[in-house]
Image (cartoon, rainbow, N blue to C red):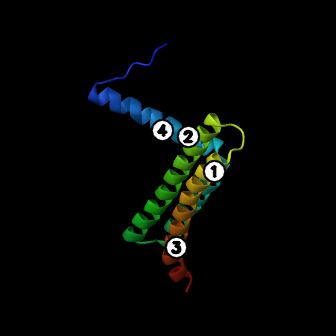
Amino acid sequence: MEFEKDNTFFTGRWKSMGFAFKGAVKLITTEHSVMVQFSIAILMVVAGFYFHISATEWMLQTLAIGLVLAIEGLNTAVEKIADFIHPNYHERIGFIKDIAAGSVFFAALTAIAIGLLIYVPKFL
């Protein structure tokens, strides 16, 4: 069966959203690092309700969670493509994968900083 692009505005967008949702579910259910990060995200949402964080804090927390999960998704895609192109170890592929992982590291550091800024004052 050949892929046929849906050029209509509404049904095309609806199908795209379906593919995106399917991809998000695959990411959460198959990638262990995303499972951990998604679990931490749920804990942070629960903490937000428990500590009654402000609307601004909710926005920052939501942005941080989305940033980490989105960058992790891109990292996973880069790793899957690299493994598909060159399944065995290759120095250049390793370099590319390390850079992609580094972007997740920066996103995670940002999320940790935001979490500390929000929650440390709640304990002091």
Q: Is disc 2 in contact with disc 4, using a CB cutoff of under 8 Å?
A: yes
Q: Secondary structure at mark 2?
A: helix
Q: Is disc 1 in contact with disc 3, using a CB cutoff of under 8 Å?
A: no
- Up-down: is 76 above or below 57? above
- Kindly identify which residue carries mark 4: 21
Q: State the image coordinates of residue 8 (x, y, percent, origin top left).
A: 28, 25
Mark 2 and mark 3: span between their CA atoms?
A: 27 Å
Q: State the image coordinates of residue 86 (x, y, percent, origin top left).
A: 65, 37
Mark 2 and mark 1: span between their CA atoms?
A: 11 Å
- Kindly identify which residue carries mark 2: 25
Mark 1 and mark 4: span between their CA atoms?
A: 16 Å
- Up-down: is 76 above or below 7? below
Q: Secondary structure at mark 3?
A: helix
Mark 1 and mark 3: span between their CA atoms?
A: 21 Å
Q: State the image coordinates of residue 51 (x, y, percent, origin top left).
A: 51, 73
Mark in the foreground, 3 or 4? 3
